[in-house]
Amino acid sequence: MKSLTTTLSVLLLFGIALSLSLVFSSKTSEFNEILNTKFVSDRVYYKFDSIASGLLKIIRGIYGLNVGIQEKDFNTVTFQETPKDTAGYANYLIQLSSFKSFVEETAREETLNSSLNITAISERLPFNILPYGISYVHPSPFLPLPLPEGGIEFLNILHSTSPPAYLKNYNIVIRVGWEIKDITTICSGECDCIPPLEARNFTWNITTIASDGIYGSNITALNYDDTCAFIIRRTPSKWLNFTQDENRQGSLIYRLRLQPGDPIPESTVSLNLTDIQGKLKVSLPSNIISVKELLYQIERNDTTYFY
Amino acid sequence: MRGIFFSLDVLFAVIVAGVLITGFYFYLPRSQEDIYPKLYLSKIANDALSVLDKNGTLQTLNQSVINNSLIGLLPSNIAWRLNITSLSSPYPPVYCSVPTGSMISRYPADAVEQDYVTGRRIVINITSATLTNCSLAELRVWLR
């Protein structure tokens, strides 16, 4: 009887040990699966980050558009660029396309597919300012095309929400190759350009840096639904035109008219916005970069942020 | 009768022991698998490449500059092998289309690769608004 008890006890102990090792093994397998998924997710993340970093370098270094933000008192977002002429824009597109080919073909990794949707940043090169819902976009078609009245249009800033109560003012600095002594200004519409200015929803503060000095700042006060135009003109064939129409509340539409051979002015546009809940971010359009791991089916399909 | 009983008892004991030993043999090694080193090495390799990309070291494509930075950046218990393959052609219509060679370095020089993990980074060079070079940096790391 004693030996039977001993045998059964030993058997039971071994059974418990085996069961525990089974449970432990099963839990470890689950844990390792989680770690494997984490490992693959990291691969996807690093690949995405690598592509996003290259894309931002191309926009900064080849297109020549810089974005800055400042979070102090107001939230300020600044866009600085010298618009491309037709040849410069075409060259930017070719280089963007070459980068896409490199990412999708040459740098392709086994089980990791990457794709770059350059259409979204070729047509209007839009930037989204979050959490405000404001877009900084270029005209469509992007290429500087003759306007009906002559010249080219190359910059729009639009509000996608209405009314844009958090917009306080635009600071605009245009660096032109003209002389100040020759320029005249025209203010028309419902806005107020002549001091003392009436209190309005927001202002445009426009400064022109010319070849012989600095002109401005010219302040225009306007309401979100005003129709307004402020024109800085040198000759009938050379001018800067800032407008808001009542259908695009809080917008600034900047048109530039130049003649062949004129240097294209550099523009710096800053938006001052009241601080609201949410982190201030500037992003490219959504879903421009996609990285997918084929075995685990882990995918990141997202945009990239300047800030 | 007693002999048969003992024989069956021994047979039963052997079968039970066999099942238990086989079970331990299969399950214990599985429970001891450790993927942490792989994860750790992956983060080290990719983070190192990100740092070198963001501070402009990889863009130099200078072997000694990159090697010195990596030696300073990576923990001393890590051995590594870096391979950078580049494509160039700074002229339209196609950029980054012509292979311009690769750069391989290893630290320590006599390190034998074992259980390595590879980090990868796309590196581009832009000079005077022109995409002059596209490279793929691959950093293999393993524990020394």
Image: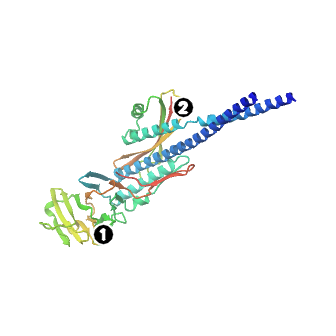
Q: Secondary structure at mark 2?
A: loop
Question: Is disc 2 on the same chain as disc 1?
Answer: no
**B54 is higher (above) or lower (below) than A230:** above
As helix, strand or loop, the secondary structure at mark 1 comes to loop
User: Mark 1 or mark 2, which is nearer to you?
Assistant: 1
Label of residue A124 in the image: none
Q: Pointer 2: residues within 10 angstroms few (<14), some, or many (20+)?
A: some
Residue A214 at what x, y percent from top left? 16, 56
Q: Are marks 1 and 2 in contact (CB under 8 Å)?
A: no
Q: Residues within 10 Å of mark 1 (few under 14, many from 20)?
A: many
Q: Quadrant of the N terminus of chain A?
A: top right
Q: Compared with residue A219, is residue A31 higher up or lower down, i.e. above or below?
A: above
Mark 2 residue type = Glu
Left or right position of A286 against A209: right
Q: Amino acid at mark 1?
A: Arg
Rendering coords of residue A139 (x, y %)? 34, 65
Measured as percent of width and height from the top left, residue A239 is found at 22, 65
Which chain is home to disc 2? Answer: B
Q: State left or right for residue A205 relative to residue B110.
A: left
Q: Residue at x 65, y 38 (%)?
A: A19
Q: Residue at x 30, y 72 (%)?
A: A247
Report the residue that reaches farthest toward the right.
B1
The residue that disc 1 covers is A248
Residue B71 location, quadrant? top left
Q: Nearer the viewer, residue B53 or B102?
A: B53
Q: Which residue is mark 2?
A: B113
Quarter where residue B113 is shown = top right
A133 or B92: which is nearer to us?
A133
Can the viewer see residue B25 in this picture? no
